[in-house]
């Protein structure tokens, strides 16, 4: 099995939420959603997602097609606002990137394919 891992987080200040995805094991992801309200925070909501082989393979093919591997380390347009971070590894390929209020041109495509992988849970 090729060494693969996904670690992604996204925090939206206006929506007052933080969400993350991390690899737990072979084709198993942990999705976490939590409120960032300062008062009356509910407990985080978590879902364990086992991704079918065909969907897992399709995700990595799409990552290659949109060339997430070429992302640079940091994207920023303002100090305040939403932020995201990503660490991906598959075999000898890896990328680490983060951003605040912006991302690479193909960020929305990546977000869409990642959302498909977690069954539409990303907000």
Image (cartoon, grey):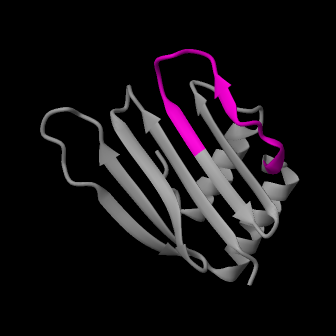
Is residue 121 among what the camera can see? Answer: no
Could you say which quadrant of the image residue 93 lies in? bottom right
The region drawn magenta spans 69-85
What residue is at 60 percent from the left and 80 percent from the top? 26
Q: Position of residue 70 (x, y in %)?
A: 83, 44
Q: Position of residue 45 (x, y in %)?
A: 30, 58
Q: Position of residue 40 (x, y in %)?
A: 12, 40
What residue is at 44 percent from the left and 61 percent from the top? 31
What residue is at 65 percent from the left and 49 percent from the top? 112
Could you say which quadrant of the image residue 6 lies in? bottom right
Could you say which quadrant of the image residue 15 lies in? top left
Q: Position of residue 25 (x, y in %)?
A: 55, 78
Asked if the stretch drawn in magenta spans residue 78, the answer is yes
Q: Is residue 89 above or below residue 20?
A: below
Q: Is residue 93 above or below residue 55?
A: above
What residue is at 71 percent from the left and 74 percent from the top? 3
Residue furthest top as drawn: 78
Is residue 93 among what the camera can see? Answer: yes
Q: Is residue 71 left or right of residue 117?
A: right
Residue furthest bottom as drawn: 1
Q: Quadrant of the N terminus?
A: bottom right
């Amino acid at each position: 099995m090729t060494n693969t891992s996904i670690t992604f987080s996204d925090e939206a200040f206006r929506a007052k939420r933080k969400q993350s995805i991390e690899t737990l094991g072979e084709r198993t992801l942990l999705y976490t959603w939590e409120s960032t309200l300062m008062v009356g925070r509910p407990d985080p909501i978590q879902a364990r997602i086992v991704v079918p082989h065909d969907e897992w393979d399709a995700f990595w093919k799409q990552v290659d097609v949109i060339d997430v591997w070429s992302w640079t380390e940091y994207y920023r347009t303002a100090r305040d606002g939403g932020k995201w971070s990503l660490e991906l590894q598959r075999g000898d390929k890896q990328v680490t990137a983060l951003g605040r209020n912006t991302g690479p041109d193909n960020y929305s495509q990546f977000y869409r394919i990642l959302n498909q992988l977690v069954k539409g849970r990303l907000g």
